């Protein structure tokens, strides 16, 4: 095919004509319809007070309690199908919604409803000419979200978006689609209706397959910001696609936490933190790389071997046939694995973590405050921990707020757990200082359209 013909065919595909496959067309129609419905419904949030939105989130908690049996039944179907497909145990764990998790989800919604909203404005300074500068916080409008087959994330996302006065278009992995559908249809939408909020503000893409994920990041006028989370390769591919179409993303593609055991470490504490950091193998902030200071390597290796054998965890010792920071949670069939390696000292361990891993989270176990300080000063990742587990890098564990994901980009903008506090646009507003009662005030909620492309999130 000639170069000109190739370019024309790509343009035809992007414009949505007959060059699209049936799956692509179905996905385009579904995403466009959902985004348009969400954009229309988002206007309803303009007139809603913070109290009304908190009431909607409390109603989500109540509806979840009432619908727990139906949610559990749908989830059991998802789990059975996933097991029949040979899905690894760590991924099954992410999919499961047992009684304890449903109860925790309900409690987290109530906690979120009780938190103060994002401040609408704050004073910056007086300017010459009897003027005053304020910073206003405005919602994005409609936020897209693509996430792994973890149905609890449906409520995490929906509640964060409502709290921040944003509508949302959600797309989850096909393995969780039954559970997600029940959560939207029997929890989120009825709760919005209970609170007098348009139930269309949260949309779920029901089309299976990856085509819908790609369409989600190709619509900058409808979906100026998309939250991406999931397996590294697919999420990075979606982020690249989004960049080509002018869609901004908060991408959570990679994880894998690090623990460094210093020679001054309390050995019992070290053993306990290793174990507690491996309680769930399919999550991003689990222990992935364990570094041990060289002088205590002979003493610690047998201790590590005893813990991993008891937990059923495979251990990769040097020389490694893989990258030192290889993320085992994303390696199907090898999720129950950690990498163990030596480090010269705290500064060397921090440098290994900086250079060889994603920069999600790292912990130093040390009684020597100088060694701990060296590690914390040198490590540049999103979360750093001293004598505690990196599993704490989680929205609810860290901040008592559900998260939409964890951003590890080394750039300005929200970093670490992303919550409703981060899902707004900054606007500088100058008004006359002594304008009196008629001075314009920021609305509690403003729906933005194409201009939301100016979002500062990375």
Image (tube, rainbow, N blue to C red):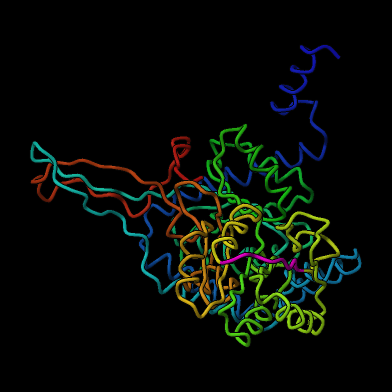
Residue 416 lies in the magenta stretch:
no
Q: Position of residue 34 (x, y in %)?
A: 62, 47
- Residue 230 in the figure: left or right of residue 333: left
- Residue 398 in the figure: left or right of residue 304: left
Above/below status of 435 relative to 91: above
Between 107 and 363, the one nearer to me in the picture: 363
Q: Position of residue 188 (x, y in %)?
A: 58, 65
Q: Quadrant of residue 364?
A: bottom right
Between 449 and 134, the one nearer to me in the picture: 134
Above/below status of 198 relative to 23: below
Q: Position of residue 82 (x, y in %)?
A: 85, 66
Q: Residue at x 38, y 59 (%)?
A: 48
Q: Residue at x 62, y 57 (%)?
A: 352
Q: Residue at x 60, y 80 (%)?
A: 65
Q: Quadrant of residue 220?
A: top right
Between 183 and 14, the one nearer to me in the picture: 14
Q: Residue furthest front?
A: 295
Q: Position of residue 72 (x, y in %)?
A: 73, 77
Q: Which residues are magenta?
A: 338-345
- Residue 74 in the figure: left or right of residue 152: right
Above/below status of 350 relative to 218: below
Main secondary structure found in the magenta portion? strand
Q: Residue at x 36, y 60 (%)?
A: 118
Q: Quadrant of residue 431?
A: top left
């Amino acid at each position: 095919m000639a170069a000109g013909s190739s370019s024309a065919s790509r343009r035809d595909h992007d414009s949505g004509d007959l060059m699209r496959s049936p799956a692509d067309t179905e996905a385009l129609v579904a995403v466009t319809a959902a985004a348009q419905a969400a954009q229309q419904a988002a206007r309803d949030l303009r007139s809603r007070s913070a109290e009304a939105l908190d009431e909607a989130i409390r109603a989500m908690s109540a509806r979840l309690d009432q619908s727990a049996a139906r949610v559990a039944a749908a989830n059991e179907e998802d789990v059975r199908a996933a097991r029949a497909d040979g899905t690894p145990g760590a991924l099954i764990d992410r999919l499961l919604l047992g009684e304890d998790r449903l109860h925790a989800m309900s409690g987290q919604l109530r906690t979120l409803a009780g938190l103060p909203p994002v401040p609408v404005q704050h004073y910056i300074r007086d300017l010459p000419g009897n003027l005053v500068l304020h910073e206003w916080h405005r919602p994005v409008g409609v936020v897209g979200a693509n996430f792994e087959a973890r149905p609890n994330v449906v409520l995490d996302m929906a509640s964060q978006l409502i709290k921040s006065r944003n509508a949302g278009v959600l797309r989850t992995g096909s393995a969780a689609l039954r559970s997600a559908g029940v959560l939207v249809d029997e929890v989120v939408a009825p709760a919005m209706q209970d609170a007098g909020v348009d139930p269309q503000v949260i949309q779920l893409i029901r089309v299976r397959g990856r085509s819908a994920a790609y369409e989600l990041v190709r619509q900058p006028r409808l979906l100026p910001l998309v939250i991406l989370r999931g397996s590294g390769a697919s999420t990075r591919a979606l982020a690249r696609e989004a960049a080509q179409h002018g869609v901004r993303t908060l991408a959570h593609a990679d994880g894998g936490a690090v623990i460094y055991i210093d020679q001054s470490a309390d050995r019992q504490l070290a053993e306990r933190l290793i174990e507690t950091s491996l309680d769930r193998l399919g999550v991003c902030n689990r222990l992935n790389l364990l570094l041990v200071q060289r002088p205590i390597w002979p003493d610690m290796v047998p201790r590590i071997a005893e813990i991993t054998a008891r937990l059923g965890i495979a251990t990769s010792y040097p020389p490694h046939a893989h990258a030192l920071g290889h993320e085992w949670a994303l390696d199907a069939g090898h999720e129950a694995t950690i990498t163990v390696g030596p480090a010269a000292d705290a500064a060397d361990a921090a440098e290994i973590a900086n250079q060889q891993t994603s920069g999600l989270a790292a912990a130093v176990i040390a009684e020597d405050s100088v060694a701990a300080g060296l590690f914390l000063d040198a490590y540049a990742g999103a979360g750093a921990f001293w004598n505690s587990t990196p599993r704490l890098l989680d929205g609810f564990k860290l901040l008592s707020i559900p998260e939409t994901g964890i951003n590890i980009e080394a750039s300005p903008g929200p970093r670490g757990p992303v919550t409703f506090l981060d899902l707004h646009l900054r606007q500088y507003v100058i008004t006359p200082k002594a304008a009196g009662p008629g001075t314009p005030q920021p609305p509690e909620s403003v729906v933005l359209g194409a201009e939301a492309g100016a979002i500062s999130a990375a």
